[in-house]
Each structure stands twice: as structure tokens, then as C-alpha cells.
Image: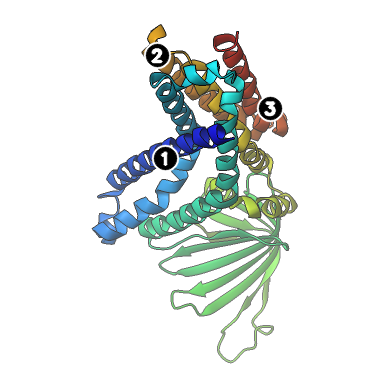
Amino acid sequence: MTLYFYIARRFLGRFLAIFGSFFALAFLMETTALFGRFDSAGLGVLDTLRLALLKSPTGVYQMLSMVVILAALLLFRGLSRTSELVATRAAGLSGLRMVAAPMLAALLIGLIGISAYNPMAAAALRQFETETGRYNSGTVSAFSLSREGLWLRQGSDRGQTVIFAERANFDATRLSGVTFFEFDASGVAQRRIETGYARLADGAWSLGPGKFWLVNAKGKVPDQAAETFASLSLPSDLSSDQILDSFGDPTTISIWDMRSFIDRLDRSGFSTARHQVYLQSELATPLLLAAMVLIGAGFSMRHHRSGRTGQMVLMAVITGLAVFILQDFVQILGANGAIPVLAAAWGPPVSAMLLGVGLLLHMEDG
């Protein structure tokens, strides 16, 4: 048991060192990308650094599998260089039993990642998107889902419009059971519009038959100022892509809120495939990280005097990248409905696990 704790402790130390390096690199890259991007908004150096800090956790989290495989490579190459692997083999400890401790550590890292780090990174990215949207346009278009339906907000220099819809079609270009609340630039309510449907096209909402009320008409109560219309057009700076992207990026949603969000998304009429694939992929993260330990061990547990050390390390990194790319590709297929959600989310981790076991049995115990 002492040996297992020793190996797990060394693995965690290398993981934390590589994770910190990746985080610092991501922070520097985001800072470089953000400098000069918001000069017109008067963004200072400290604000730029804060925005980069908000964006960095998500980038590092997406590379977690590569961090784990590099930590496994460093661990087992180090044990091989100091002949500790030779000593453990002489004591009768097989390669699979040697890998058990770092695998359990990787499983623990995965559980902590999805339960604690994921919500933190999602909240930081959501704040980043909100602030950069304000710096880009001066106003923020807000989107949210409730149990009753879909809420949108569009803004301009002339004022704000809040939109509520009971349902929407798959690409958010047609809303049903719609109510528009118009406010002027000072926030005073101007008009309320109700219609059976509204269609978004060519920079405007085209409303079907409905009714509107002038909320602050002088000398009239709202019901006296009400008028019906057969059709009406309202300017809009929204697009279908903006609305879908606001609901389409699951990385801004905590895994603890994902299930309820998927339910609301389904009730509102939007496709939930992408979010379901993301949720299942997050749940499969511990298995994927454990598989990366196996792959790293399979390529690095040979004695360092056997040669081809550089080639084996390179092959391990390439294999890890291949698994990473395959996972992204399969998730895209799952989000588009080409393959089942469970196959898209759990297929790559299971395949990587089988590949790692095969490598270890062939190169270490074969």
C-alpha cells in the first residue's frame, strides 16, 4: 500500500506541475489575443488581464486529457530512469498493478474536475462572454430559458426590447406566443405588443396578427390606447446564429445545471443533442483520464536502456492527440444526430481504455 501511495503522490505532483504550466501558457496566449482588441472601449491593462484570467480555465480544462498523459509519461520515464520499475518487477509487481495507483488518481482528478472545476470554469467563461459582448457593442443582448418559455433582450442606442416566447422552432427564426416589451433609452416602458407568432428575417421581426398597448400615453389608460394590427415589423440586430450560439455553447453552463437546462431547452423547441453529448462526455471524463494514464504507461514503462525513448514518448503524445481529436469529431457527429448520444460521448473513452490495456499487455507484460 505504501508503494501505491508513493506512485500516486508522484503522479499528482507531475500533474499539478504540468497543469500549472498549461494554465500559465493559456493565460499568456489569451492576454496576447486580448491586448488591443478593445481599445475603443478604453480597456486598461488590468481589465485585459482579468478578462484573460476569466477565459483561461476553460481552455486548460479542455486539454485535461493531454495534461494527464504527459504526467503519466513523466512519471513512468522517471521511475524507469531511476530503476524503480526494475525493483518493483523484481518484487513481483506486474505492470497493470503498477498503473493502478495513477489510474485511481486520474479518476479522482476527473471527478474533481467535473464536480468542482467545471462549474467554476463555466461561470468564468459566462462572465467573460458577458463583458466582451458589452465592450464589443456597448450593449448586451441577453438570452435565457425559463420554465414558461424563452426570454430575449435586444438593445440599441434608442432603447431596449424584451421578448418573451412560449416556444421557438429549431433555428430560432420563428417564435410562437410572443410578447414584446419596448423601453426607451432611459428605461421607461413605451409599448407592449402581443402576437401569435413572430418571424426573424433580414434584420427585423415580422409579426403576425396581434395587438399593442401604448403604456405611457398621456391622458389615456393602456386599454384605451390599444390597437390591433394585421402585421407589424420591428427592427432587430439579432440573428438566428446569435440566439442559437447563446444556447449552443454548453461550456458556459455548470454540469450541475445542465440537466434542468436541457429540459427547458427541449420544452422551448430547440435541439438538445449538443448539450446531451456534452453532459455525457463530462460524465465520461474520469474514464478518459484513466485511459490516458494507461496509454502513457504503455509507451513509457520500458527500461530506459532499451533505447527508442524519444520515439516512444512521441508516439504516446501523438496517440493522445489522436484520441483528443477523435473525441471532438465524434461529439460533432453526436450533436448533429449522426450517431447516438451515448456512443458519441462514451465511445472514445472506452476505445482509449481498450487501446491502453492492449498496449500495456503487449509492451509490458506481453
User: Most extreme residue toward the front, as rendered?
Assistant: 91
Q: Label 3 belongs to which residue?
A: 338
Residue 332 in view, yes or no: no
Residue 117 in view, yes or no: yes
User: Most extreme residue toward the bottom, as rendered?
Assistant: 219
Point out which mark residue 19 bears.
1
Give the foreground label among 1 and 3: 1
Q: Which quadrant of the structure image shows residue 104?
A: top right
Q: Label 2 belongs to which residue?
A: 304
Q: Provide residue 256's location: percent of width, then percent of height.
A: 64, 53
Which residue shows up at 42% across the image and 40% down it? Answer: 19
Task: Decide which of 21, 7 is in the foreground and name it.
Answer: 7
Task: Decide which of 193, 276 is in the foreground and name it.
Answer: 276
Circle nearer the N terminus (3, 2): 2
Which residue shows up at 59% across the image and 71% down it? Answer: 181
Task: Decide which of 19, 277 is in the foreground and name it.
Answer: 19
Q: Provide residue 80's location: percent of width, then percent of height.
A: 43, 19
